[in-house]
Image: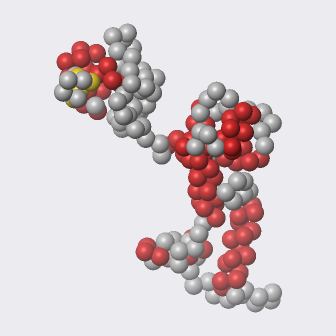
């Protein structure tokens, strides 16, 4: 489950077998289902039995592989997949391509969900391009909506390095009010 996306039909069959075991269904007679399968899969702290939803669990394990590819650039797995599927790029910038292995398609299928959970660790801001990277949290969009200027390119250009704080005059002169409130 940590390498391949399990088809929904297979997961449904496994869930059906688990529910038959739990409810004790026999060939010719059925027993009362005291709780729905959805309720059994609810967390214990919310009143359920805490059974795992295998689709969510499968996605979590594949997401872990995506995280591994992002954090461990020198790993053998990353080097092999990078050479074949996203040479010269990072995993989050990779394209699916044609003819990829089932493992690659499985891991890649979680890329959008994985990217939703990523956040920037700005650091000194010297590698964050202000105009092309999603670094502002303004609700619906993480990109700058102000027209591009050549005065500044990277986030560190907006910081007063003497005080290690935002250069407010520079920000007010370049960005519209909506962006300024977000920063």
Horizontal and vertical percent position of residue 87: 68, 29
- Tell me: residue 72, above or below residue 57: above
Name the residue nearer the viewer: 20 or 113: 113
Name the residue nearer the viewer: 177 or 62: 62
* Residue 125 visible within the image: yes
Name the residue rendered at 24%, 17% in the picture.
Answer: 170
Name the residue rendered at 39%, 24% in the picture.
Answer: 126
* Residue 112 visible within the image: no
Name the residue rendered at 46%, 23% in the picture.
Answer: 132
**Residue farthest to the top, as pictured:** 150
144 sits to left or right of 16: left
Horizontal and vertical percent position of residue 22: 65, 83
Q: Hey, which quadrant is residue 174 in on the image?
A: top left
Q: Hey, which quadrant is residue 34 in on the image?
A: bottom right
51 sits to left or right of 47: right
Name the residue rendered at 67%, 32% in the picture.
Answer: 86
């Amino acid at each position: 489950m940590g390498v391949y996306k399990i088809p929904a039909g297979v997961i449904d069959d496994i869930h059906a077998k688990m529910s038959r075991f739990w409810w004790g269904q026999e060939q010719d007679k059925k027993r009362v289902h005291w709780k729905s399968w959805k309720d059994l899969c609810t967390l214990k702290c919310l009143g359920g039995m805490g059974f795992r939803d295998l689709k969510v669990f499968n996605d979590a394990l594949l997401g872990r592989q995506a995280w591994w590819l992002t954090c461990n650039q020198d790993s053998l797995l990353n080097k092999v997949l990078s050479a074949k599927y996203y040479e010269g790029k990072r995993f989050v910038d990779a394209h699916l391509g044609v003819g990829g292995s089932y493992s690659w398609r499985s891991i890649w299928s979680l890329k959008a969900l994985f990217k939703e959970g990523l956040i920037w660790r700005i650091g000194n801001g010297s590698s964050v391009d202000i105009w092309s990277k999603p670094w502002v949290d303004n609700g619906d969009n993480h990109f700058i909506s102000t027209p591009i200027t050549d005065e500044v390119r990277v986030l560190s250009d907006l910081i007063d390095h003497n005080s290690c704080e935002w250069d407010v005059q520079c920000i007010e002169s370049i960005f519209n009010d909506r962006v300024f409130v977000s920063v």
